Image (cartoon, rainbow, N blue to C red):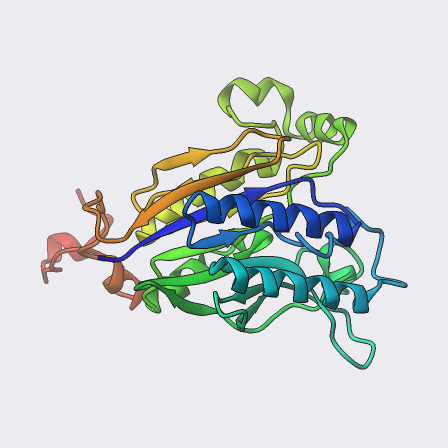
Amino acid sequence: MAVVAVATCQFPVSAEVGANLRWVARQMRTAATRGARVVHFPEGALSGYAGIDLESFEGFDWTGLRRATGQVIDLAEELGVWVVLGSAHQLGRGHKPHNSLYVIDPNGDIVDRYDKRFCSGDAAGCSGDLAHYTPGDHPSTWEIDGVRCGALVCYDYRFPELYREYERAGVQLVLHSFHAANASAARVTAIGDAIGQELRPCNPAATFTYPGITMPAAMTAAAASNHVWISCANSSARESLWPAFVVRADGITVGRLRRNRPGVLVSTVDTEQSLYDSTAAWRRRAMDGRLHSGTLVDDPRSSSRTDL
């Protein structure tokens, strides 16, 4: 039986590594007490998120971040839990760091590191994530108690090809870390005005913003079309644009925290549970380029597309 208890965490991520570490340690202990096997944190959970929580990595204390990461690793071993930890990963030769998720096992070993592949920003790398981070080049998969897992970070959600890639690899649970938070109330209002406040009734969401509307919808679609469970961890720093939640493989949300408040959501992922999957018969064919169901026929009434 392939079952794993996942703790999806949110707290007010900040530029203070020490404060972030205290939140991470506290929520790891809470998750372990509640029976979680894997503890999943937001994007930049330990380091803070450049461009939002901190202005840049200029003068950043990388030694202190490594020390804090070591404490998380030690605590994972002490508690006997897996940890998927959002942080920055320093590179050499003056290169910008990766925006990463460290995958830490219950033995206190880093078994993989996922580096955010689609960093937001312009082609020149002068805006968004690309002003602060170097994009990654690989998927990351690993197994927990018979459940095949994969990792993604925030803006990656805009690229459904990444979910298809994981479906091909047999991934059953995606740990998708976000940082859609620490926005001023004025910024939230400005985004809503840009969308058009008259459209608010048509777009019920935690916040009337692009992430608040599109991200949960995209996670529902990704889960249902790929038949994969998704844990969505987010920062709760005000204003958080949506609260952390978990989506089942049939696209149904099974749990959600409260926006702007720290919390730990523990969900049981049972990959052998019988769930609705309307695309099962044709998904792999579509991924292989056969973009129809059933059997085609050779019929002139079919091939002629301008006749009645």
- Residue 63 in percent (x, y) is at 80, 69
- Pick the front one: 74 or 85: 74
Could you tell me which residue is drawn at 62 percent across and 51 percent down? 25
Where is 191 relative to 65, above or below? above
Q: Quadrant of residue 242?
A: top right
Q: Quadrant of residue 259?
A: top right
Where is 110 relative to 59, above or below? below
- Pick the front one: 77 or 284: 77
For the C terminus, give its image quadrant.
top left
For the N terminus, give its image quadrant.
bottom left
- Residue 217 in percent (x, y) is at 46, 38
Please give left or right for residue 221 compared with residue 261 in the image: left
Could you tell me which residue is drawn at 44 percent across and 44 percent down? 219
- Pick the front one: 68 or 238: 68
- Pick the front one: 261 or 157: 261
Please give left or right for residue 127 compared with residue 229 in the image: right
Could you tell me which residue is drawn at 60 percent across and 28 percent down? 207
Q: Is residue 108 visible?
A: yes
